[in-house]
Image: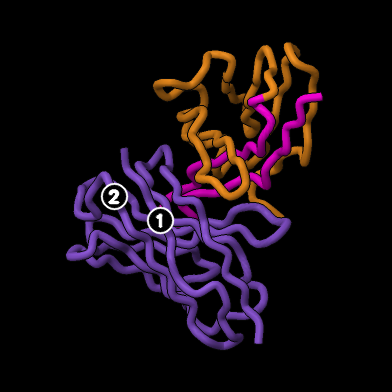
Amino acid sequence: QSALTQPASVSGSPGQSITISCTGTSSDVGNYNLVSWYQHHPGKAPKLMIYEVSKRPSGISNRFSGSKSGNTASLTIYGLQAEDEADYFCCSYAGSSTSWVFGGGTKVTVL
Amino acid sequence: QVQLQESGPGLVKPSETLSLTCSVSGGSVTSGSYYWSWIRQPPGKGLEWIGYIYDSGSTNYNPSLKSRVTISVDTSKNQFSLKLSSVTAADTAVYYCARGTGTTFAWGQGTLVTVSS
């Protein structure tokens, strides 16, 4: 069982928008604006897509958007493309003892 | 751009010590303000932060693993290492090394370690 809860899978057709949720607690997601999202193709290094809840690193498409409300963070992918098919997981800072917690990952399928 | 690569045995016997090394290129393990970290993902489960070494000496470990974990740095080789003692089947996982900034991680590709006799 992961510290942060994500849906196991989300799917959508090309061009549609999908949202992945990441639910934590008031000790992690709810307490820090330090949520990040990663795209992961198995066998490869995870790739940073969003950091500090809603910031995009250089080179990441503006089709990817992050937000947070209370203890739940969300990643929205607009205009879904075949290349977006991958696993996505969230990460949150959780204080000096636990440091970082992660979600279980969500498999995004483009129909 | 920093690159990280894990290496070590893919099979470890129960009760023995798991040892992995992370080789860093495109950056130095002596650079300040980075958390040189280890993270793992058991099959079918989520990611778990194991611990980090910071500023070439300070360490912080996941409380659930603290009694069995040691993370160290070899500055001469630009590497950092993980040792996990008294392993059981529950320690079977893909192990990732990563460079943390406090808000983000740059990751290696991961290496599968299986604990089995």
Asked whether the beta carbons under mark 2 and mark 1 sit within 8 Å of each other, the answer is: yes
Rendered view: B64 above or below B25: below
* Residue drawn at 50 percent across, 51 percent down: B109
User: Badge 2 is on which residue?
Assistant: B25
* Residue drawn at 69 percent across, 30 percent down: A85
Q: Is residue B89 left or right of residue B76?
A: right
Q: Is residue A92 magenta?
A: yes
Q: Amino acid at mark 1?
A: Gln
Residue B5, numbered circle = 1
Across and down, in percent, residue B62 comes to 49, 63
Across and down, in percent, residue B12 comes to 56, 80
Q: Is residue A26 left or right of residue B52?
A: right
* Residue drawn at 22 percent across, 51 percent down: B28
Chain given the colour orange: A
The stretch in magenta equals A83-111
Quarter containing the N terminus of chain A: bottom right
* Kind of element beneath mark 2: strand
Quarter containing the C terminus of chain A: top right
Question: Which chain is mark 2 on?
Answer: B
Q: Amino acid at mark 2?
A: Ser
Numbered circles on residues, count: 2
In which quadrant of the rendered view does residue B20 lie?
A: bottom left
Q: Are marks 2 and 1 on the same chain?
A: yes
Q: Is residue B112 magenta?
A: no
* Kind of element beneath mark 1: strand
Q: Colour of chain B?
A: purple
Q: Of marks 2 and 1, which one's residue comes earlier in the chain?
A: 1
Rendered view: A58 above or below A97: above
Across and down, in percent, residue A80 comes to 69, 17
Across and down, in percent, residue A4 comes to 65, 45
C-alpha separation, residue under disc 2 versus residue under disc 1: 9 Å
